[in-house]
Image: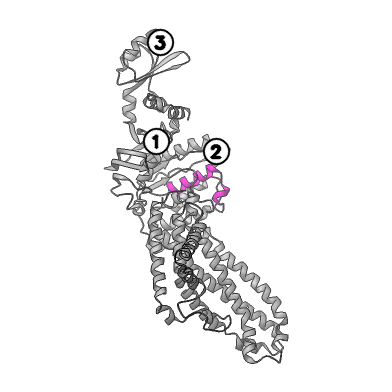
Amino acid sequence: MACIEARGLRKAYGTTVALGGIDLRVEEGRILGLIGPNGAGKTTALNAIVGLTPYQGELNVLGRDPWTERDQLMRDVCFIADAAVLPRWIRVSQALDYVAGVHPRFDRAKAEGFLAKTTIRRGSRVRELSKGMVTQLHLALVMAIDARLLVLDEPTLGLDILYRKQFYDSLLNGYLDRNRTIVVATHQVEEVQHVLTDLMFIERGRIVFDRSMEEIESRYREVTVHPEKVAAARALKPMHERQVLGRSILLFDGVDGHQLAGLGDVRTPSIADLFVAVMGDKPDNQAGQAQGAAR
Amino acid sequence: MNTRSNAMPEFPGDTQASAPAVISATRRMYWSVRRELWENRSLYLAPLAVAALILVASLIGTIHLPAKLSDPALDPMQQQELIEQPYTFAALLLMFTTLVVGVFYCVDALQGERRDRSILFWKSLPVSDLTTVLAKASIPFVVLPLVTFAVTVVTQGIMLLLGSARLLGSGQSATLWTNVSLFQMSGMLLYHLVAVHSLWWAPLWGWLLLVSAWARRAAFLWATLPLLAIGILEKIAFNTSHFAALLGSRFLGGPEGAASSGKGMSMASLTPAPGQFLASPGFWIGLAFAAACLAAAVRLRRYREPV
């Protein structure tokens, strides 16, 4: 069964088109990474999925229309917007009380167990916690909810590298035990690399790339070409070429591995390299490319 | 940084899905109202602080009480007025306090959560916009009148005890107790709070919550300036002041013909009888206006994003 199904999903703010009629299908149990430059429409798409924003077109999440049935949908869906949405005045104990009070699938003991592994005190207010601790708290609340879909929008924004790494580690550990679907939008590409089962690039409100990780591993090859074989390699029509330390690195789509082996060192490209190859062709996308590669 | 402080929560190994418990609408409402009290502690701290000040003032006032009561020039009517006055003033001051607290609460209620982006957290939980707006509306309609009532009755009780203690032995404490009927005062106060603060001022609360849900910033100005503008434009265009009179009668008087029937500042003179309320079309129109405002606020909250 599809967990999320969208057809012609469109959203415009005035004359600015945030989503230009996208089709999307996420099967249950997948971990989808939604990657794109700032302003590509990632947040708009996620907000539509969790019922925060009205949209045109068809959208079905766990069999419900998110816009008209947000409160029922949220029994099965968890959403982390970004690090700073927990109200600053709330105490840790109050946050636990409140979620336990309104959420039928919240397991308080589980959340308490998560928090016991951190240095967060029950009596602290959110404003007294560091950014990383706030994220730990939010994740503890969300992970204690027995949800079917977890939607994460830039969950590690502004966190230092230790917290970022551990965030995705716990996400993955949690995922291995359960059959839940996760959609994560980020531009910190390399961190999600090993977590994902599916990858989607979004740019200016359109999906420009949509593959499963297995497909990517079997289809895409990156070759650091021996200088004397560059011409031969180029003849195989690489989708992208870049220069690193004077050597040409070519990215191929669907070219036989044996053919490539003779040309140089062959490996599976990283998501970041793939991102640059897919998005970098367009000259007006330079800013987004630089950002995607830098992160 | 040690590893302990960095540990992110991890799932335990169990995979069995527990049957989801059902949470009733009442329980969601209860926690939503508690949430408001956590966030806005001034809702009860401000009246408590004012009550403490009243008690200090009344303690000083009781020093001269025996002298005042034994003034032979007083007839019983004047004596009753003299004795009752501090109790009425205490109630009026506390009601004024919670009115101000209520206005500031409502102006911020639906805007604050957008300003600090916490609306994204609240909306990620299975609580409908209707429940949220009703929980917020229950503060000026139900919670503040109850807080006012409880704090006022306790304050007046303590004032009475202070007065009695001062008069102890002078043989005058009986005069105090016959002139101050706590029970009657409390009944009148409760009726006043329900009739005036909740119901007669309902359009005020509805309007403020609506503006709070709508305005991106400066909700207080949006709540007040348009009303001022309408009054001024009406004066320029038609040289009349019906709108100003409407607002004036709403907030300074009661329904038509009800105001200033009593003498002096007593709770009874400030509160029209139930019949006057129920017979007044303005009362019902006000309630309908408040309901419309709240319905619009629910709808707006659904569309609103962080500002």
> From the viewer's perspective, is residue A247 above or below residue B229?
above
In the image, the segment drawn in magenta is: A118-146
* Residue A139 falls inside the magenta stretch: yes
Q: Which mark is residue A226?
A: 3
Query: Vertically, is B17 above or below B238?
Result: above
Q: Callout 3, which amino acid?
A: His
Q: Residues within 10 Å of mark 3 (few under 14, many from 20)?
A: some
For numbered disc 3, what is the local secondary structure? loop
Q: Secondary structure at mark 2?
A: helix
Q: Are marks 1 and 3 on the same chain?
A: yes
**Residue B248: x %, y % from top left:** 50, 71
Dot 3: chain letter? A
Residue at 41% across / 31% down in the picture? Answer: A193
Disc 2 is attached to a residue of which chain?
B
Seen in the picture, residue B36 relative to A70 is either above or below; the reply is below
Q: Is residue B106 visible?
A: no
Three-letter code, disc 2: Thr
Q: Residue furthest top?
A: A228
Chain bearing tag 1 is A
The residue drawn where x is 39% and y is 73% is B284
The quarter holding residue B5 reads: top right
Which residue does the numbered mark 2 point to in the structure image? Answer: B3
Q: Using the rendered image of the protein, determine whether residue B219 is visible from the camera's viewpoint.
A: yes
Which residue is more in the foreground, B67 or B223? Answer: B223
Q: Nearer the viewer, residue B10 or A210?
A: A210
| Residue that label 1 marks | A40
Residue A42, quarter of the rendered image = top left
Q: Is residue A87 above or below residue B40?
A: above
Label 1 crowd bin: few (<14), some (14–19), many (20+), radius 10 Å: many
